[in-house]
Amino acid sequence: MMNARQRLMSIALTIPDTAALLEAVTMLGESEELVEKLWGNVDYLKKGFVDRGFDIGHSETPIIPVMIGDEDKAKAFSQKLFEKGVFASPIVFPMVPRGTARVRVIVSASFSQGDCDAGLKAFEEVAAELR
């Protein structure tokens, strides 16, 4: 029964996950510093990707899709990023239509500018390797 497709993503949160979420909501209610840092990082990375010629779609969230197109290339791109210390998941069919594969960058308030720069550099290097 736990392998049924209709159960995928429908399992209740664990107690530790729920406690972590409650603490996160409390922290956000106490200060906007983390939210401001998150959106500062999002803006910095979006500009960095665009300045380097990447198509990042039209996301309005802290998740930046770096459009690759070809599914195999998106998977290879993600693997090469991982080898360089950058985790960015490939998103391919059936999650997106065929021919619109992408690598998903999830931005965090915990990133420093140095982290963002290192990630952008890795994207540049992998793009050059896969041309």
Image (cartoon, helix red, strand yellow):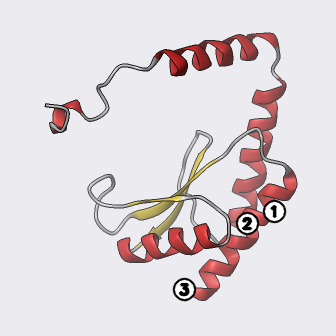
The residue located at (29%, 26%) in the rendering is: 10
Specify the amino acid type for callout 3: Leu
Give neighbour class at mark 1: few <14, some 14-19, many 20+ (Cα, 10 Å): some
| Residue 55: % across, % down | 57, 65
Separation of marks 3 and 1 at Cα, in angstroms: 20 Å
Separation of marks 3 and 2 at Cα, in angstroms: 15 Å
Q: Which is nearer the eye, 21 or 77?
A: 21
Q: Is residue 55 above or below residue 115?
A: below
Residue with the mark numbered 3: 130
Residue with the mark numbered 2: 120
Do labels 3 and 2 touch, CB within 8 Å? Answer: no
| Residue 129: % across, % down | 60, 87
Picture quadrant of residue 33? top right
Give neighbour class at mark 2: few <14, some 14-19, many 20+ (Cα, 10 Å): some
| Residue 128: % across, % down | 63, 86
Q: Is residue 19 above or below residue 46?
A: above
The residue located at (54%, 86%) in the rendering is: 130
Q: Which mark is residue 117?
A: 1
Do labels 1 and 2 touch, CB within 8 Å? Answer: yes
Separation of marks 1 and 2 at Cα, in angstroms: 5 Å
Specify the amino acid type for callout 2: Leu
Specify the amino acid type for callout 1: Asp
**Quadrant of the image containing the C terminus:** bottom right
